[in-house]
Amino acid sequence: MLDMSQYKDKTVVVTGGAQGIGRGIAQAFAAAGARVVIGDIDDEAGREAAFLINRNGGKCFFFRMDVSSWPSCKELAAFVVAESGTVDILINNAGIAHATEGSIFDETPDRFDRMLDVNLRGPFLCVHACLPFMTRSGGGSIVNIASVRAFMSEPGNEGYSASKGGVISLTHALAISLAPRHIRVNSICPGWIDVSGWKKGNPVPDQLNETDHKQHPAGRVGEPGDIAAACLYLCSSDAGFVTGTNLTVDGGMLVKMMYE
Ligand SMILES: NC(=O)c1ccc[n+]([C@@H]2O[C@H](COP(=O)([O-])OP(=O)(O)OC[C@H]3O[C@@H](n4cnc5c(N)ncnc54)[C@H](O)[C@@H]3O)[C@@H](O)[C@H]2O)c1
């Protein structure tokens, strides 16, 4: 059983932590006693996420930022250090996607560029901005949220799939570069995670049907807590010998034969 006390008073930055999977990750680290800073582009959602965590006895700050902007990432890191003195853990979760199935003609050059800017360049910029402070505190852990779409696709997913494949490569490159600084870097590939109940406002969760759940070898669609649990493991001392790797958390879908 993971010793959650190791997260007490650690400083954890979660990009895209205002909603969805990131909100679940932020809540999980806060529940373990960490100081959490959410960096997100959505002001309303970010304030709400921080408010809910603080109301439940956690410690959470929100900083509005855009991971695709270098000045914005530097401002986030400066804010974190001003509030908390250091950065111990960085979860690069912020990401954008598009309709699951489209056409190559929907994938315009501008859309492709934006996808790479946010999903791939964003994590790189956040690492660069936080690195001096992680180094100063003697090391830490970074988790990049990729996707099973790094390995498999539906039509019209070029930008998203390429960005997430890039995140996996970025992860092993960073793991080697940052090892001398005692920083471990890993990625997680979520499968289908139902985030409908984790949005701002009072979201009504999607009504998933039996087929949605039963197609997964694990018997159900994923939830943000599944990814949060993987983050808690990868950032813990239990994973001290784990760096540069990818953990797929998809209920078994990636290894399931699809022949019908
Ligand atoms: N939900 C899934 O099924 C699933 C599956 C595989 C991978 N993922 C990945 O998990 C991560 C979270 O996905 P989600 O489903 O929770 O998405 P979501 O849309 O629910 O939440 C994403 C959050 O990122 C923020 N964000 C978007 N662009 C940003 C930017 N430029 N700068 C800062 N913040 C920004 C949004 O405001 C939002 O709060 C993404 O990287 C996504 O690609 C999700």
Image (cartoon, helix red, strand yellow):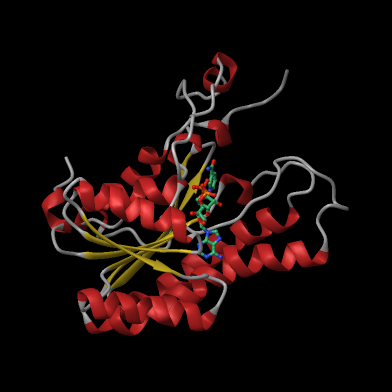
Comparing 226 with 14, the one in front is 14
Depth check: 256 or 58 in front?
Answer: 58
Quadrant where the C terminus is found in the figure: top right
Residue 233 visible in the current orientation: no
User: Percent x, y for residue 47?
Assistant: 37, 57
**In the image: residue 125, left or right of residue 116:** left
Image quadrant of residue 92?
bottom left
Place of residue 45 in the rendered image (x, y in percent of width and height, measured from the top left) = 44, 53
Q: Residue 117 is drawn in which quadrant?
A: bottom right
Q: Position of residue 10 (x, y in %)?
A: 19, 64
| 107 to 260, vertically: above or below | below
**Quarter of the picture holding the N terminus:** top left
Of residues 31 and 192, which is closer to you in this image?
31
Q: Is residue 52 visible?
A: yes
Name the outermost residue toward the right.
105
Residue 143 falls left or right of residue 98: left
Residue reaching furthest to the top: 210
Locate residue 61, reporting x and y percent: 29, 64
Residue drawn at x 23%, y 56% is 236
Does residue 10 lie above or below 213 as drawn? below
Q: Residue at x 56, y 17 (%)?
A: 209
The answer to whether residue 159 is left or right of residue 168 is: right
Residue at horizontal 31 percent and vertical 55 percent from the top: 50
Numbered disc total: 0
Asked if residue 235 lies left or right of residue 58, the reply is right
